[in-house]
Image: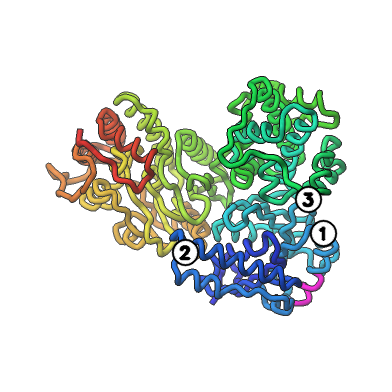
Amino acid sequence: MSFTHQGRTLHKVAVIGSGQIGPDIALYFTKVLSPFGVRTVVVDVSDDALAKGKAKLEKKVQKGVESGAFTPEQQAQMVGSVAFTNDYAQIAGADLVVEAATENKDLKARIFGQVEGLVRDDAILVSNSSHLEPEVIFANARKKDRTGVVHYFFPAERNLLVEVVSGKDTAAAVRQWLLSFYEAIGKVPIPVRSRYGYALDPVFEGLFFACALLAEEGVGTTKQIDVVCKQTFRMGVGSFTAMNLTGGNPITAVGLDQYTTKINAWFRTPQSLKDKVAQRANWDVPARGEQVEVPDAVAARIRDDLLGAYFGICGEIVDAGLVTIADFNLGIEVALDMKPAFTFMNELGTRKALELVQAYARKHPGFVVPKCIAAHGAENRPFEVPVVLREDRDGIAVLTIRRPKVLNALDQGVFEEIRRRFEECDRDPKVHGIVLTGFGRKAFVSGADVNFLARIDSSAKGEATSRASQVCVDAVQAVRKPTVAALNGLAFGGGIELAMACETRIAQKGLRVLAGQPEANLGIIPGAGGTVRLPRLIGLERANEMLRTCRPISSEKALAWGLIREEVDGDLVGRAVQLAQEMAAGTAKRSRMAEGPLPAVPAALPPVEIGHLSQKVDAILQKAILGAARLPLAEAIPFEAKCFGEVCGTEDMRIGVDNFLKNGPKAKAPFVHR
């Protein structure tokens, strides 16, 4: 058995190093690859490290069983697919090797020198280095084109972000395969250009350095600074606590001194960090539940200094061309669990952000005011931070909705960005068709962001909110070029409404849950065209059942009902591009939605069992379905918005939304049917 992705087949993967992170990398590999029969081998020269790594992996899998994340059968499969060994010969036959040894260039060079003699010439070799450039690690490699860095973040089995760092000799095809492979197995990869520390560690370590300077200057205690840091950047923990948890003092001490020459003269290893390393001591940080008092003036000084440092560090990285703003923002949010810099600057105002950076630079020699912040701040112009990414492939624009932390959920900003992207592609003479897909393997779009519903306080506002979304979705349907929705995972609520506005849809094969309209669970009805387009695609009776019961359907049923055109076993987006090309060339049938009313609309809908759902909302939903079916498409869409507004005037809408926000999607709302 094996796992094949984009023409490359994995039978065995190897992880070198059974220290702090190697077993966690192996755990993730066995979780996603053992169902395909792929073996994972962990190699280390230390028997003690191997024993501890094996125990660590098995303990985490056991915890997964206890929490319900894994079944006992999955546990047996995962644990049974991993071998811990001191025999380097076991690497032979590995198709992908990830080195996770100590951050030492000579050691890494020796390891890969040995590995190259054991694997085939087409095996990919990567290092999980946190700082060293690929050119340094693989300086003596025989085949440099199949090498690179894949930088994992703590804890590696749960933190989804990986930096894919290609060196000057890394083949473009290898880089692209790594990015695609890691996305396919559920990670969030971002491409980063080679430089010492890459894109994200200078942020983590630079913010820590700014915190350490404040403590050394006596502005606040490490506890106070940690609290303000956590609050300012909406982090799970502050910088000092993060350093304790990751055991990062020694490697940060080395990194900061290297940044002095690799980035700029502001960076250096502060004396307080040198002392902690020498003493092998942790920082004094707040205990769990401890309340730390920080006077307002002290908090303001700490906050302004940290913001100035943070924005400046991030701006320099963009100036250096290491990463795009969109990828960088995503990396900061996912890997470092903090508010992304460029979103933060936009909210604060780029002029204010520039003032904070300039103030910090005046106090700290060597600190650079980035050109990108200076340019945007001078005009108070926001940064463009797209979440709908465009890639052109042979005349077809591939648009990818990328919001992995919320499974690509839509808010009004994303709706607007989708509209702009489709209109931009429609105007572009080089574009002959458009493919719309979602990032990752779990969701095309998980639905609309429920938080905006909580702000609706009247029927009028409800109708206006619905119309704002509808206008954006209508812009998708208005495109005359072929449009294909490639459903890579579940498409719920606004997600399936968006997909239905595309001319046709295809889906990954074998999805037990693909499409659903779960709005009635929240005490609302679809508001972006669901009551209008779904009956036109699958028939009134089937749509009636889906809309009123909230029960989703599989990809197999979606194909049988005509909601999708194909199930794809393999490269979904590649097939979508091919289909769009064929439709544009006239060799595949076009399937634009008819714009007239539906024929033979009944006086009433067939009864269905709605269980605990609101009878009041259901009555309005039935009115929306029947009324829209009797109207031309152009009139049916705003009719749905009026019905959505009517729902927003009910008690049950407020009950449903409040229940969802407080108790989550699985809790049944106590509807009162008013």
Residue type beneath disc 2? Val
The residue lying at 41 percent from left, 40 percent from top is 448
Disc number lying in front (3 or 2): 3
Q: Which of 196 and 249 is in front in this view?
A: 249
Q: How far across and down, in percent of the image, does residue 664 sit?
A: 38, 44
In reply to whether residue 115 is colored magenta, the answer given is yes
Sequence-earlier tag: 1 or 3: 1
Please name the residue that numbered disc 1 is placed on. 104
Residue 525: which quarter of the image?
A: top left
Spatial CA distance of label 1 from label 3 is: 20 Å
Picture quarter with the N terminus: bottom right
> Range of the magenta residues?
112-118
Magenta-colored stretch includes residue 211: no
Mark earlier in primary sequence (1, 2): 2
Q: How crowded is mark 1: few (under 14 residues within 10 Å), some or many (20 or more)?
A: few
Q: Which of marks 1 and 2 is in front?
A: 2
> How far across and down, in percent of the image, does residue 266 sit?
83, 35
The answer to whether 444 is drawn above or below residue 123 in the figure is above
Residue 143 visible in the picture: yes
Front position in the image: 461 or 425: 461
Q: Which label lies toward us, 1 or 3?
A: 3
Return the residue at label 2: 65
Q: In which quarter of the image is the C terminus?
A: top left
32, above or below 232, in the image: below
Q: How far apart are marks 1 and 2 (CA)?
A: 36 Å
